[in-house]
Amino acid sequence: MSGVATRSALNLANQLRAAGIRSQAVLSAVAKTPRELFLDAALGHKAYENTALPIGQGQTISQPYIVARMTELLLESSPKRVLEIGTGSGYQAAILAQLVDQLCTVERIKSLQIQARQRLKRLDLHNVSFKYGDGWQGWVNKGPFDAIMVTAAASKIPEALLEQLAPDGVLVIPVGQVTQQLLRVTRHESGFETETIEMVRFVPLVNGALA
Ligand code: SAH
């Protein structure tokens, strides 16, 4: 990435700091990422508001606060290899790609995946592998991962994702139906530890067949 912060992206980062985001690394990634690139031109004027917005196919680009919060939670363990489930617009992937060595990301809607891939290429983010597939299965061949982030709400924690966590790896995932709890699950030698972080609202992690 060119690494230049724009005034509006910097304003967004300042809003997120005021909302409680502490990680300087995350805030500077937000300040350097042109969020309007991840939206239709008609929504460009809302790109730096701290809100979720539609990206087509009934899906949304997550609220910047929650993107930053989940990224900050995930970075606490300094992960190098990371898996994201739910590529969507690619915005969360663009933030993560600036902060970790290798990012793998899985999306079940082909058209969203294609657009996201083009956007990251345009930003010169080349440490990202894209897969069109079902996120409930993770990405077996690329694992294990130091951290996994799920950006859609799961009815329960997907077993395959726990299996693909490296020792001491963390999974950040919203779990629930209408409203959800954001959970952070850590893989210890003795078993999995689950922390409840806060209430969140995501589109569902769809079961089964690809779109
Ligand atoms: N991280 C995205 C958020 C997208 S919303 C962003 O920054 O824009 C959630 C995404 O999860 C949607 O694109 C949706 O298609 C995808 N999704 C839902 N169920 C899925 C599944 N089972 N496997 C992979 N992707 C899934």
Image (cartoon, grey):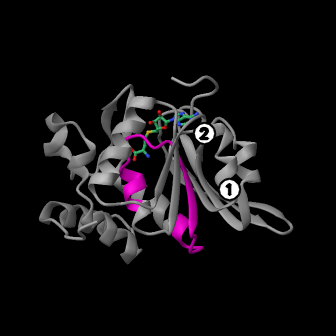
Q: Quadrant of residue 14?
A: bottom left
Label 2 crowd bin: few (<14), some (14–19), many (20+), radius 10 Å: many
Q: Which of the pair 113/60 is nearer the observer?
A: 113
Callout 2 secondary element: helix
Q: Which of the pair 184/170 is nearer the observer?
A: 170
Label 1 crowd bin: few (<14), some (14–19), many (20+), radius 10 Å: some
Residue wearing tag 2: 135
Which mark sits nearer the N-terminus, 2 or 1?
Answer: 2
Residue 39 rendering spot, x and y as whole percentages: 25, 41
Q: Quadrant of residue 67?
A: bottom left
Which residue is rendered at x = 46% and y = 30% of the image? Answer: 109
Q: CB at mark 2 closer than 8 A to ligand 1?
A: yes
Residue 167 rendering spot, x and y as whole percentages: 75, 68
Do the residues under discs 2 and 1 have CB atoms within 8 angstroms? no
Q: Magenta includes 211?
A: no
Q: Which residues are magenta?
A: 73-95
Residue type at tag 1: Gly
Residue type at tag 2: Gly
Residue wearing tag 1: 143
